[in-house]
């Protein structure tokens, strides 16, 4: 993203993410944003275009950071099961904590994919996490931590698909025990 004159656009987006997280796009007024960012409306519109464009940018930044965190967990995993469980739980946690339509969730959209639609960015983020899962599962298989008949790519696709369904159900506030039970069943796919 970068700077706009003396105004640090990345920092502004980072500062607004929490506000959008708590209130959603419609619950956050332009004045709320101007107050948090300490800028005037002309500067805001020059930097971001509109509140909705700024919201999309904040979602992209939030999701990119979340995806990076999940990838790091998987890249540094020495034991596959706890790492996969941690990633799956993290991908559902935000939606259970705040199921509002405006709340960002892991893997919804990702970084600076210029020219991509929000749906294309969402797919790119999911593929990034899926690829990291496949890599971690492949390393685990090489260490003997996965049964020989398990395909790391197929498992990664299953787990990514599973967690997206679980995120949708989590927004219905089905409860922590529902999510924990579903995660336990998904983890058995690694056995």
Image (cartoon, rainbow, N blue to C red):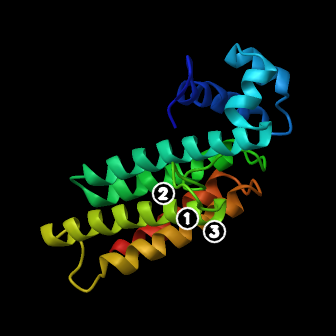
- 31 to 10, vertically: above or below: above
Q: Whole-percent x and y of residue 9?
A: 57, 28
Left or right: residue 160 versus residue 23 is left
Left or right: residue 190 versus residue 41 is left
Left or right: residue 105 versus residue 25 is left
Q: Whole-percent x and y of residue 153?
A: 35, 77
Label 3 vs label 1: CA separation?
5 Å
Looking at the rendering, in which quadrant would you find the C terminus? bottom left
Residue of label 3: 165
Dot 3, crowdedness within 10 Å: few (<14), some or many (≥20)? few
Residue of label 2: 88
Residue of label 1: 163
Q: Secondary structure at mark 1?
A: helix
Q: Whole-percent x and y of residue 71?
A: 37, 52
- At x 32%, y 54%, the residue is 74
Dot 1, crowdedness within 10 Å: few (<14), some or many (≥20)? many
Q: Secondary structure at mark 3?
A: helix
Q: Nearer the viewer, residue 34 or 26?
A: 34
Q: Whole-percent x and y of residue 180?
A: 56, 57
Q: Is residue 173 visible?
A: yes
- At x 73%, y 55%, the residue is 171
Q: Secondary structure at mark 2?
A: helix
Asked if the residues shown at circle 2 and circle 1 are in contact, with their CB atoms under 8 angstroms apart, the answer is: yes
- At x 64%, y 62%, the residue is 117
Furthest-bottom residue in this view? 149
Counting residues from the start of the chain, the first of labels 2 and 1 encountered is 2
Asked if the residues shown at circle 3 and circle 1 are in contact, with their CB atoms under 8 angstroms apart, the answer is: yes
């Amino acid at each position: 993203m970068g700077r706009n004159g003396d105004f640090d656009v990345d920092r502004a987006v980072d500062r607004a993410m929490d506000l959008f997280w708590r209130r959603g796009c419609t619950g956050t007024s332009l004045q709320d944003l101007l107050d948090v960012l300490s800028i005037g409306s002309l500067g805001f519109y020059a930097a971001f275009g509109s509140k909705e464009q700024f919201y999309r940018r904040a979602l992209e930044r939030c999701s990119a950071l979340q995806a990076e965190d999940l990838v790091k967990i998987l890249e540094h995993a020495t034991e596959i099961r706890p790492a996969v469980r941690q990633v799956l739980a993290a991908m559902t946690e935000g939606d259970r904590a705040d199921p509002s339509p405006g709340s960002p969730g892991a893997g919804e959209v990702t970084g600076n994919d210029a020219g991509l639609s929000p749906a294309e960015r969402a797919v790119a983020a999911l593929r990034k996490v899926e690829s990291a899962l496949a890599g971690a599962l492949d390393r685990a298989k090489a260490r003997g931590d996965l049964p020989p008949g398990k395909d790391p790519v197929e498992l990664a696709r299953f787990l990514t698909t599973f967690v997206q369904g679980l995120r949708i159900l989590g927004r219905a506030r089905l409860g922590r025990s529902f999510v924990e039970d579903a995660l336990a069943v998904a983890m058995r796919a690694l056995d």
